[in-house]
């Protein structure tokens, strides 16, 4: 057993199992063989089954005409486009709902998590009810219910008609909330608008550079600059000035009522809004708990020590509590983003055409290519999740307190 | 792991048979028929308050079970959503799929299935609120349409609007109930699905008279039972049980009067009910009185229709094209000879 | 010497505090209106609560309970809830299509479940742990029925195998691996050769069986509980192994474990369920076709095992390194130190995480409706397909949501209680 055993000892077969020097290796070899055997068994079965059903594995269906319409699309798509195109539309829709959902969920979660710690009894209880309510009911139910609520409690487009309409548009006749979705003014990009974009991007870079410079200066001299105001000014002012110099190349196109529906403008469909909101509400309940736990995990001694150094409350929050709490908050926060993305695969419940609705739903149903569609679908979700989890690992490596 | 092991032991192991050849033998060996139906389609398949399976498709399967075993209860109903129905059939989880499924070319060929015939000629229609002032589907240009995703309905809708040079905005929904909820709340101007379902839905609306099912039927939706490719004998059995129900209606044989036909001069009836001398059903491996049992199970086609879709059921669908050819419909069975 | 004009001989009785500081008013002031910001928040919250309840209360309070169909409800008063559907169908929502005369079986199974959890949660009752061990078999027998002996034979076989292992270790072979292999082989042989005849003999001598209920009949909350609880229990040992494998310094094992965990956690459960319902037939030998509930349970088990592994890994990471080193310095082997030192502590700190995983899993069982199992949500669509209830929408969802809420909220409260309890005894 001793690791200091002399190497002259004769090798016996039983040592493969009993000697700690070899046991690990033989265990690995056995595991590997079993793993490969199972893998080939599965592949072999699949081949046999496919042969039996007279099917083949082919991704050609991706280049066939899809034949179905998708109402929400970020890129041009018609019923004559291919199944592959439909899948891409679905992927973009998934990413869109995940992105917007994550932002709303984070904001709401922060808000609710902090208010949950409020000394105001009714607010704290209300937030607790919010958290428990959303956390303890299946997301599928929430998606369906939010969708139904949205359609039942918002006016139909025809309510906007007539001399004395039952409903009016908000924000100076520019936003219409109807039970078919919300209509916003859409930006129209005229000549010269590309300059404004370039200017805007440049300002962002300058602002980032400035924030770094300010941070460096604070570390060197201890003096802090009003970073927020200056960087906001850097981002906003040049773009704004250029906008007027170029003669307002970007204008807004307002939605208006025509026939059955509102026309023009940016149309956010109810399915999208409901799905995003339901996912955001549900996830924000988890995020709120994470935020609360993160803030409470920073020991009270830290606050007191900072106060005894003479720091003001908001600086205690910014310089002492938040940096420590963030270290605890961020990893589970990101894994909640991942959960939100995966939960968005329930989009079909409200008819939002995400990638599971197109590739894993209608395409699969029409072409009968279950194996191929599911492979692609799982591959997509895996890519997203690997990206996100590699980010978590990066964060952990760079920000975690190093033990020893 | 332990728990899994127990599970395996208690699992129902259904040997599906390597090539799916002898489905009838498998069914007989098992002692019951596995019939894939919808998890919930009004009039076609659902369970009632007491947990009993009811519906148009359910009754067809009962007739088939009665033909094989002489017992309409020797059938297990497997509820299937539209997403998994074809794979369940292909994998042998069910012997026959009677799940208001539209017979199309690609389903027949590409998905390797055999349709046994048509038990219900459906078609896609539109329902609108009367206050909209629309009387024809051709006036729906620019309308918002609620449509169930993943069905042929969606494709027909796209084709119909394209053909007529109209535009529309689809609001895809997960199921009929959601379409209905969206339509009632006004989130869509019109709602489209198979006309049978539209009628079934309209009856239960708060004020049925405020709603109108438009006269246009924009697609052919021949619904029928189907089986896997490759077992012709099994397909024949399913097909001729369906035909027997139709013939029974033509001849006026009902569940109630079926025993009073022993002395009829009609040779076809004797062949059908197994009261004659020749036993033609032995050719497919069924008992001589198989069709007698099938009709006895839940009545002839007309009775099944009436009980599940017609006035008795509360859905109030007219027979229309689904009437026997002798009464102006297009139900026409090949002779039982 | 100054003359003292007045000396108070008795203490003044304490004055009553100002009315604004005590009682309801004081409470209000301190908790709701302590600052203008707080006051605004309070008023906003109250406004919000009123808005939420304004429509809901009259709708729910005046609901019909005794009508025969939705049509009757609408004819009576279309503006209130039609809870009659729950009155007619609550049994289906709870038990699915389980035969009505056998409802006592799932009920008893549930009661036994509560009893079986007790020894695990409360060390005081640990002497009843044997009940927790026999519970899984008992539950399966009660739910699915069939011969009592076909379930108990599994226990007999496993008990014989364990006995053999202990005997071998104590007296003959001192190598764990070989002893384990031998007794495993014996158990396998027992199941393949001896179990069938024994069950048949017992069945003829002492027939003891319940009517068989097939999985097709399982549904409602019973199904959710079956899938959820089996998934969590079965995934527990797998999760521990995966967590250890992920921390292992054997690269092949680590790679397989990491690959498995990341794969499962990377894809939505619904795709895995889809694999279970649609693709599993491709991966298994031609002609294999087994129970859909079992397939779902297997997939759910694999799914929660990956999450469980991460929870337990968190617990392992939460232990100070000194524990590993101390146990190694005592001369304990890897498995000894895991069993005696590491796992008991790691599992203890992971309990809240495990409960949370369970709550998540239990909620996720609603997804089985998409692959046509009749869980509460799946049943909702079946119920609506009945012409009598065609058009029912909110009533079913509200009821189902409420049931899930009660169950999950109870669980999460319990997990928080555990969390507090574990914190104090540090």
Image (spheres, rainbow, N blue to C red):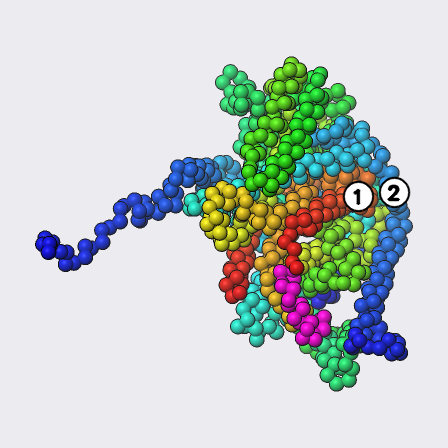
Mark 2 and mark 1 in contact? Answer it, CB < 8 Å.
Answer: no
Label 2 Cα crowd, 10 Å radius (few <14 / some 14-19 / many 20+): few
Is residue A143 or residue A173 the one in the foreground?
A173
Q: Position of residue B27 (x, y in %)?
A: 80, 56
For residue C226, above or below residue B243: below
Chain on which label 1 sits? A
Look at the picture and state if A232 lies above or below A120.
Answer: above
Residue A67 placement: quadrant: top right
Residue on which the image places disc 1: A376
Image spot of residue C320 (x, y percent): 62, 63
Q: Residue at x 62, y 44 (%)?
A: A140
Q: x, y (%) of residue A332?
A: 63, 49
Q: Secondary structure at mark 1?
A: helix
* Residue B122 magenta-highlighted: no
- First-in-chain label (2 vs 1): 2
Task: Give the residues drawn in magenta, as a range.
Answer: C315-336
- In this view, the residue in front, B285 or A326, is A326
């Amino acid at each position: 057993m001793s690791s200091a055993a002399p190497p002259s000892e004769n090798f016996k077969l039983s040592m493969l199992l009993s000697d700690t020097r070899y046991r690990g290796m033989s265990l690995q070899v056995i595991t590997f063989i079993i793993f490969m055997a199972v893998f080939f068994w599965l592949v072999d079965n699949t081949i046999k089954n496919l042969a039996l059903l007279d099917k083949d594995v082919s991704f050609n269906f991706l280049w066939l005409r899809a034949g179905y319409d998708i109402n929400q699309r970020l890129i041009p798509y018609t019923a004559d486009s291919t199944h592959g195109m439909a899948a891409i539309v679905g992927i973009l829709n998934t990413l869109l709902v995940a992105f917007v959902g994550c932002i709303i969920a984070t904001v709401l979660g922060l808000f609710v998590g902090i208010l949950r710690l409020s000394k105001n009894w009714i607010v704290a209880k209300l937030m607790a009810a919010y958290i428990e309510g959303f956390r303890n009911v299946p997301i599928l139910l929430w998606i369906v219910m939010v969708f139904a609520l949205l359609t039942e409690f918002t006016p139909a487009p025809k309510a906007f008609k007539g001399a004395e309409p039952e409903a009016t548009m908000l924000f100076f006749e520019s936003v219409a909330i109807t039970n078919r979705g919300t209509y916003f003014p859409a930006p129209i990009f005229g000549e010269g608008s590309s300059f404004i974009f370039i200017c805007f991007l440049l300002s962002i870079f300058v602002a980032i550079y400035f924030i770094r410079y300010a941070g460096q200066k604070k570390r060197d001299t201890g003096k802090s600059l009003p970073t927020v105001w200056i960087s906001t000014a850097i981002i906003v002012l040049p773009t704004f000035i250029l906008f007027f110099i170029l003669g307002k190349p970007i204008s807004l196109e307002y939605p208006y009522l025509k026939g059955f529906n509102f026309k023009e403008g940016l149309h956010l469909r109810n399915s999208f809004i409901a799905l995003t909101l339901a996912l955001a509400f549900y996830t924000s309940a988890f995020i709120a708990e994470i935020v609360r736990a993160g803030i409470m995990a920073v020991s009270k001694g830290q606050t007191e020590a900072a106060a005894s150094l003479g720091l003001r409350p908001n600086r205690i929050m910014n310089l002492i509590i938040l940096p420590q709490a963030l270290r605890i908050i961020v990893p589970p926060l990101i894994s909640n983003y991942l959960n939100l993305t995966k939960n968005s695969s329930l989009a079909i419940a409200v008819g939002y055409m995400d990638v599971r609705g197109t590739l894993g739903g209608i395409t699969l149903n029409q072409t009968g290519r279950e194996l191929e569609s599911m492979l692609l679908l799982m591959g997509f979700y895996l890519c997203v999740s690997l990206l996100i989890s590699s980010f978590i690992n990066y964060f952990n490596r760079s920000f975690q307190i190093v033990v020893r | 792991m332990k728990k899994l092991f127990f599970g395996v032991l208690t699992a129902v192991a259904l040997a599906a048979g390597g090539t799916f050849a002898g489905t009838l033998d498998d069914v007989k060996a098992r002692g019951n028929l596995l019939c894939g139906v919808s998890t919930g389609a009004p009039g076609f398949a659902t369970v009632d308050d007491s947990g009993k399976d009811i519906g148009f498709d359910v009754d067809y399967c009962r007739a088939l079970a009665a033909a094989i075993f002489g017992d309409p209860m020797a059938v297990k109903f497997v509820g299937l959503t539209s997403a998994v129905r074809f794979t369940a059939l292909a994998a042998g989880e069910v012997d026959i799929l009677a799940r208001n499924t539209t017979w199309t070319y690609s389903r027949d060929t590409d998905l390797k299935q055999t349709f046994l015939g048509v038990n219900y000629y459906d078609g896609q229609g539109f329902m609108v609120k009367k206050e909209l002032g629309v009387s024809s589907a051709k006036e729906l240009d620019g309308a918002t349409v609620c449509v169930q995703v993943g069905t042929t309905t969606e494709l027909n809708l796209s084709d119909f609007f394209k053909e007529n040079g109209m535009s529309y905005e689809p609001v895809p929904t997960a199921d009929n109930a959601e379409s209905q909820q969206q339509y009632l709340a006004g989130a869509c101007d019109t709602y489209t699905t198979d006309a049978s379902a539209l009628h079934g839905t309209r009856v239960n609306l708060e004020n049925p008279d405020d709603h109108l099912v438009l006269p246009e039927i924009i697609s052919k939706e021949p619904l029928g039972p189907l089986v896997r490719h490759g077992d012709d004998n099994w397909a024949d059995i399913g097909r001729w049980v369906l035909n027997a129900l139709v013939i029974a209606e033509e001849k006026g044989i009902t569940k109630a009067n079926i025993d009073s036909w022993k002395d009829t001069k009609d040779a076809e009836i004797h062949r059908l009910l197994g009261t004659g001398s020749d036993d033609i059903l032995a050719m497919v491996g069924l008992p001589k009185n198989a069709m007698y049992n099938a009709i006895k199970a839940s009545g002839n086609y007309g009775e099944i229709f009436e009980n599940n879709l017609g006035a008795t059921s509360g859905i109030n669908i007219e027979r229309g094209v689904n009437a026997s050819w002798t009464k102006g419909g297009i139900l026409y069975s090949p002779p039982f000879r | 010497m100054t003359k003292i004009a007045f000396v108070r001989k008795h203490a003044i009785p304490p004055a009553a505090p100002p009315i604004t500081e005590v009682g309801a008013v004081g409470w209000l002031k301190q908790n709701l209106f302590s600052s203008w910001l707080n006051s605004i928040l309070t008023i906003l919250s109250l406004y919000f609560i009123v808005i939420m309840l304004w429509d809901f209360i009259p709708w729910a309070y005046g609901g019909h309970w005794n009508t025969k169909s939705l049509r009757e409800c609408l004819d009576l008063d279309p503006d209130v809830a039609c809870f009659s559907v729950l009155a007619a169908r609550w049994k289906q929502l709870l038990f699915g299509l389980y035969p009505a005369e056998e409802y006592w079986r799932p009920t008893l199974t549930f009661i036994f479940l509560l009893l079986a959890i007790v020894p695990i949660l409360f060390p005081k009752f640990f002497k009843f742990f044997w009940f927790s061990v026999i519970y899984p078999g008992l539950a399966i027998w009660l739910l699915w029925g069939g011969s009592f002996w076909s379930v108990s034979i599994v226990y007999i076989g496993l008990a014989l195998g364990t006995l053999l292992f202990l005997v071998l270790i104590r007296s003959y072979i001192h190598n764990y691996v070989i002893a384990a292999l031998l007794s495993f082989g014996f158990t396998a042989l027992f199941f393949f050769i001896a179990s069938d005849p024994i069950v048949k003999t017992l069945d003829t001598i002492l027939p003891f069986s319940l009517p068989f209920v097939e999985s097709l009949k399982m549904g409602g909350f019973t199904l959710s509980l079956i899938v959820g609880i089996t998934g969590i229990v079965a995934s527990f040992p797998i999760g521990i192994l995966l967590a250890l494998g992920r921390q292992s310094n054997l690269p092949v094992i680590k790679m397989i474990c990491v690959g498995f965990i990341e794969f499962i956690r990377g894809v939505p459960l619904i795709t895995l369920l889809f694999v279970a319902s649609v693709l599993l037939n491709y991966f298994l030998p031609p002609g294999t076709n087994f129970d859909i509930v079992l397939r779902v349970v297997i997939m759910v088990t694999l799914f929660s095992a990956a999450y469980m592994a991460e929870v337990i890994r968190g617990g392992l990471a939460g232990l100070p390194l000194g524990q590993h080193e101390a146990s190694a310095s005592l001369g304990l082997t890897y498995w000894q130190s895991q069993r005696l030192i590491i796992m008991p502590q790691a599992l203890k700190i992971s309990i809240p995480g495990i409960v949370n995983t369970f709550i998540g899993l239990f909620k996720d069982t609603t997804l089985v409706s998409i692959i046509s199992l009749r869980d509460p949500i799946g049943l909702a669509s079946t119920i609506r397909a009945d012409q009598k209830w065609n058009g029912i929408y909110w009533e079913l969802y509200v009821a189902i949501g409420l049931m899930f809420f009660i169950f999950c909220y109870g669980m999460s409260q319990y997990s928080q209680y555990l969390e507090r309890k574990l914190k104090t005894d540090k």
